[in-house]
Image: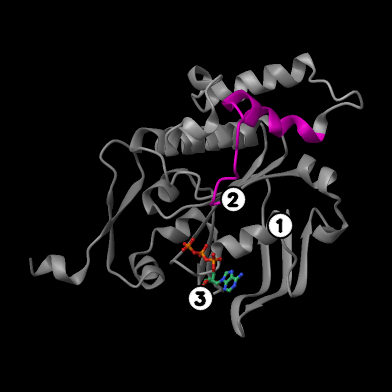
Amino acid sequence: MYQLSDVLMTRDDRCILDIPTLTIPTDKLTVVLGHNGSGKSTLVSLLAGQQAPDQGLVTLNGKPMAQFNAKALAKEVAFLPQKLPASAGLTVREVVRLGRFPWRGLLGRWSKEDEQLVDAAMAQTKVTEFSHHLADNLSGGERQRAWVAMLLAQQSPVLILDEPTSALDIQHQYHLMALLAHITQDAARGMIVILHDLNLALLYADHIVALAKGKIAFEGNKELLLDEERLSALYNTSIKLIDHPVSANKLAVVCPEELAHA
Ligand SMILES: Nc1ncnc2c1ncn2[C@@H]1O[C@H](COP(=O)(O)OP(=O)(O)OP(=O)(O)O)[C@@H](O)[C@H]1O
């Protein structure tokens, strides 16, 4: 599990993250929610070891993040940033193979297991048909799926994804979240996923961390989301919950004031 204590991040004389204490499980699917600029990417960048807090401590399974070297960390945590990395000249297969780098043997050769894991990851995110295409030539959503495959191939116990559904069509958004939920349960891996879509969170999250203005607004199991007042306050707009037509879940419907008068 991750533990944060007395974490402070300041940029341009402004406090952008202020978390006195927070525990995030690494055996559940945790969704990080919050308005634009609430600090979600800053928070997950600390969890991924991309940067250190200005003050305070972040530990993974009791070990301070600063004590992991890059290779050891890559074996524990796979990270997909909001802005996809450049993939100049790489085919989709080569992009996905990047996930196997932390595990590559001394001779620097790819093992049969590496290739099998690459194949499986591409199949899971449905990019096998693009295997030999240049990643740069893919559509935005196809490229996002290729990078998610890279993360899956990395086989780390924790995956952190910053808005992995932002470029995906509706079908692929739900397919990806179902896949992440399935992997969490089936392979006992932990997912930490930033989402803007409340309905994806309502359907697939186990655990919620919600940020507002750099502070924790609420944190705990998914049932916390089933509260119209709390959700409306988080996004500063009226949100109603209705029954999902074909499951026992709830759906969030945004009902801004002006709609009532339209
Ligand atoms: N390097 C930086 N320099 C100055 N301000 C920064 C820096 N990094 C982040 N910020 C500011 O910190 C705040 C939080 O940024 P962050 O990217 O974590 O928000 P977010 O919740 O992920 O937003 P979004 O939903 O728009 O992606 C924002 O107001 C942002 O402008």
What amino acid is labelled 2 in the image?
A: Pro
Q: Nearer the viewer, residue 202 or 172?
A: 172
Report how far apart the C-alphas of labels 2 and 3 lie in the structure.
Answer: 21 Å
Name the spot of residue 169 as percent of width and height, x first. 36, 37
Query: Does any portion of residue 72 appear in the rendered image?
Result: yes
> Relative to 197, is 183 above or below?
above
At 38% from the left edge and 63% from the top edge, which residue is drawn? 227
The answer to whether residue 88 is magenta is yes
Q: Residue furthest right?
A: 106
Give the label on residue 81, or none. Answer: 2
Question: How dense is the environment of label 2, judged by Cα within 10 Å: few (below 14), some, or many (20 and up)?
Answer: some
Of mark 2 and mark 3, the one earlier in the sequence is 2
Name the spot of residue 130 as percent of width and height, x first. 50, 21
Report how far apart the C-alphas of labels 1 and 2 lie in the structure.
Answer: 10 Å
The answer to whether residue 49 is magenta is no
What amino acid is labelled 1 in the image?
A: Gln
The picture quadrant where one finds residue 89 is: top right
The picture quadrant where one finds residue 157 is: top right
Report how far apart the C-alphas of labels 3 and 1 lie in the structure.
Answer: 21 Å
Question: How dense is the environment of label 1, judged by Cα within 10 Å: few (below 14), some, or many (20 and up)?
Answer: some
Please tell me whether mark 1 sits on a helix, a strand or a loop: loop
Can you identify the residue that label 3 sits on?
213
Of mark 3 and mark 1, the one earlier in the sequence is 1
Asked if disc 1 and disc 2 are in contact, CB closer than 8 Å, the reply is: yes
